[in-house]
């Protein structure tokens, strides 16, 4: 630590040049030596733009505003706008070229932010989109509780605002990404992935998500490495990163959320802020494909005995069958346990007639 920034060897700031700031250097002659600048990723850009605006024009507008405000492009962490605007070709081309995360907010989310923060209303934006304002609330919402450092500035067809994110705090999202198809990932899960800097998951699941993970640090492991993945995700969050631990289906159903919370309960040093993002479970997806077999009481039982003794599983099968529940069987068989499904059906068959309907569903 030094008494004044000019004596430091390293400067950590989103400012392009701290000596252009009158508060740091009122005389303009404060530079005494060469210094290394490190750029924290703590700026959220909010933009509004007219329909059909090109990526080049949007990029130039952002560049001009940052230059005017003495802010570094390297500190931009995320670009945000109205959700309908993020679907436009110019926006999608922009974030792809810049390799930056992006997020879109609904009209209701933007309007609530305008009211809560007392932001200026744009009659033009309201008439065109229904949003009371776009650039400023987008920047503030994307910053995650930050402060507006650059109020909206119009540049041609684009309006740009910049928010400074609050001091870095690690967070762990445990994200359910559904049974397989990208179409079955919820909007909330998509936002969690987009907000994350680090993604941890089983290799096959992460590969399905590659299109949503541009610019992120990705860590994958193979099958049966669940505990290792949990510990890695927690470690990255403790280092200050926003982390998404990816789980198939719903993370609270035969998945990662329980493992993470159990680890944190046992080891206080592993505790970090956690948010569980629900997903579409396989039982929801297969039920929909079959019609509506789960409209009344049902039981869900995994046939995997990796963590649960087979005797316990057999007991649960008997009780579920005796109780006349519709039964959903997870993990029916594998190379290491080829007979579990046959044994389960024998047990259930002792309580059900031969003409009991059975649905076999694959992803």
Image (cartoon, rainbow, N blue to C red):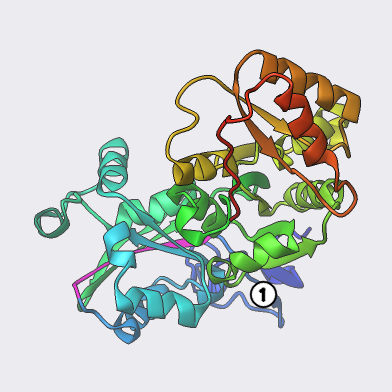
Residue 265 relative to residue 73: left or right: right
Q: Residues within 10 Å of mark 1 (few under 14, many from 20)?
A: some
Q: Secondary structure at mark 1?
A: strand
Secondary structure predominantly adopted by residues drawn in magenta: strand
User: Image point 16% across, 57% down: which residue?
Assistant: 129
Residue 248 vertical placement versus 263 (above, below)? below
| Residue under the point 26% across and 57% down | 134
Residue 47 among those drawn in magenta: yes
Q: Residue at x 67, y 74 (%)?
A: 37
Asked whether the viewer can see residue 124, the reply is yes
Residue 144 relative to residue 276: left or right: left
Query: Furthest residue to the bottom?
Result: 56
Provide the residue designation for mark 1: 37
152 to 275, vertically: above or below: below
Residue at (32% x, 44% y) in the render: 109
Q: Is residue 150 left or right of residue 14?
A: left
Q: Is residue 72 left or right of residue 342?
A: left
Spot occupied by residue 166 in the image (x, y as percentages of width and height):
55, 48
The magenta stretch spans residue 344: no
Toward which corner of the image does residue 321 lie, by quadrant? Answer: top right
Residue 108 in percent (x, y) is at 26, 43
Q: Nearer the viewer, residue 301 or 262?
A: 301
Q: Which sits in the foreground, 272 or 150? A: 272
Residue 253 visible in the shown view: no
**Percent coordinates x, y for residue 75 in the rendering:** 55, 69
- Residue 300 appears at what percent x and percent y? 65, 29
Is the residue 261 above or below the residue 88 in the image? above
Quarter in which the N terminus is drawn: bottom right
Q: Nearer the viewer, residue 209 or 49?
A: 209
The residue range painted magenta reads 43-51
């Amino acid at each position: 630590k030094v008494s004044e920034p000019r004596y430091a060897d390293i400067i950590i700031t989103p400012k392009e040049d701290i000596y252009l700031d009158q508060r740091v250097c009122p005389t303009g002659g404060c530079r005494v030596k060469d210094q290394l600048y490190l750029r924290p990723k703590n700026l959220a850009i909010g933009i509004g733009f007219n329909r059909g605006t090109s990526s080049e024009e949007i990029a130039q507008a952002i560049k001009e505003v940052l230059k005017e405000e003495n802010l570094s492009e390297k500190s931009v962490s995320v670009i945000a706008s109205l959700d309908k605007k993020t679907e436009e070709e110019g926006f999608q081309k922009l974030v792809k070229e810049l390799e930056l995360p992006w997020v879109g907010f609904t009209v209701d989310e933007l309007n609530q932010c305008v009211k809560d923060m007392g932001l200026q209303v744009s009659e033009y934006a309201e008439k065109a989109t229904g949003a009371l304002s776009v650039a400023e609330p987008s920047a503030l919402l994307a910053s995650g509780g930050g402060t507006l450092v650059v109020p909206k500035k119009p540049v041609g067809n684009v309006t740009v605002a910049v928010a400074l994110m609050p001091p870095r705090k690690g967070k762990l999202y445990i994200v359910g990404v559904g049974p397989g198809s990208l179409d079955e990932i919820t909007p909330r899960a998509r936002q969690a992935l987009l907000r994350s800097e680090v993604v941890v998951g089983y290799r096959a699941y992460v590969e399905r998500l590659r299109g949503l993970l541009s610019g992120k640090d990705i860590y994958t492991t193979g099958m049966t490495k669940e505990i290792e993945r949990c510990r890695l995700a927690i470690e990255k969050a403790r280092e200050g990163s926003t982390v998404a631990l990816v789980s198939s289906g719903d993370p609270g159903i035969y998945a990662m959320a329980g493992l993470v919370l159990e680890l944190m309960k046992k080891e206080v040093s592993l505790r970090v802020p956690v948010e569980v993002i629900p997903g579409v479970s396989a039982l929801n997806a297969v039920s929909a494909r079959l019609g509506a077999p789960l409209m009344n009481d049902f039981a869900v039982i995994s046939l995997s005995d990796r963590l649960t003794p087979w005797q316990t599983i057999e007991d649960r099968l008997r009780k579920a069958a005796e109780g006349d529940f519709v039964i959903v069987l997870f993990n029916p068989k594998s190379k290491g346990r080829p007979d579990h499904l046959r044994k389960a059906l024998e047990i259930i068959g002792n309580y059900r007639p031969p003409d009991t309907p059975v649905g076999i569903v694959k992803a």
